[in-house]
Amino acid sequence: CDTAVAGYSVDPANHYRKAPRFDVRFAGAGDWRTVYHSEPPNQGGDNDTNDAHDRSTQSWDLAFRHRLRVPQCRPALSQNPCEQLTGLEDARGETIIDARVRHTHVDGLYSELNMAEHCRIHQRRGNAREPAAVLLDAVSEPGELTLATQDPVSDSLIKFPAACPGHDDSLDGLLDNYYTPGFSFADGWGPERWFTSRRVTIPLRVLHRAKRVDVRVADRPGGTPPADCAVHDPSTERCSTGGAWSGVLSLVLVR
């Protein structure tokens, strides 16, 4: 199997181990941006004009509290050890989120109601605790481990400001922000769905003979919301949104 194509790279160990244990780290970065424009009509006057140009970046470097232990699969046993394999959660490390907000409202009736809000917001958590997760699914035959990662910055995003510093009332016709990863006007989207990675499958024989395995994970089409933001009124609203993220899940053999 070409490991580069499969989505992982391997540093082999010097011999086979029956039940190797790995320290697990997850590091990566993402970027999300949204451009929104609307011109809602006013009876007896010009349309309002609302514009938002928002963007955020996210990065993380986390270590999972528990180690990954890879057992020997024994399909003939009534309790196959591979069927007991569970995922990982509870990680700690550094997260950084940076956002830019550029909002303007031009009122079609009263120029004194024109408003603007521009700012940058930055948050660094040096010892963040995150409920990030690694989903695992072991198959005894043909002996493979399938894994995927979930939201590495969920708690940091909850603690991240939802608007500019000193923000009071929302600008007429605009949300407080459009920089949340996975943004959409439609329900069912957001960071949790966007940060769930594609699945990567690794033969268990590789893990039994590995000193280190680096697994490349990234966003997937199923987690990406509609590019037009699923606006409520296409006749008066235009929007484009999207982004990308990637990371490396590192499994390092514990000696």
Image (cartoon, rainbow, N blue to C red):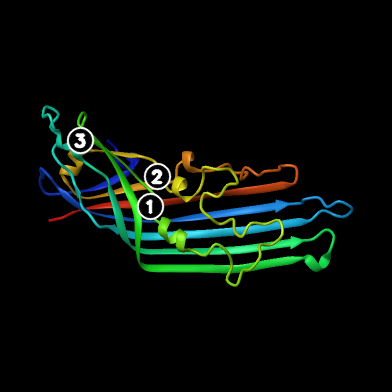
- Give the mark, 1 or 3, whose residue is nearer the N terminus: 3
Which residue is depicted at the point 12% across and 32% down?
Answer: 74
- Give the mark, 1 or 2, whose residue is nearer the N terminus: 2
Q: Name the residue under label 2.
A: 197
Residue 25 in the image: x percent, y percent? Answer: 29, 56
Which residue is depicted at the point 71% across and 43% down?
Answer: 233
Residue 247 badge: 1
Hey, what amino acid is under mark 3?
Glu
Which residue is depicted at the point 58% across and 64% down?
Answer: 163
- Find numbered disc 3 in the image and state the secondary structure of the residue it sits on: helix
Q: In this view, does 176 lie to the left or right of 67?
A: right
Residue extending furthest toward the top: 76
- Find numbered disc 1 in the image and state the secondary structure of the residue it sits on: strand
Question: Is 166 or 64 nearer to us in this picture?
Answer: 166
Q: Mark 3 points at which residue?
A: 83
Between label 1 and label 3, give the one nearer the viewer: 3
Hey, what amino acid is under mark 1?
Gly
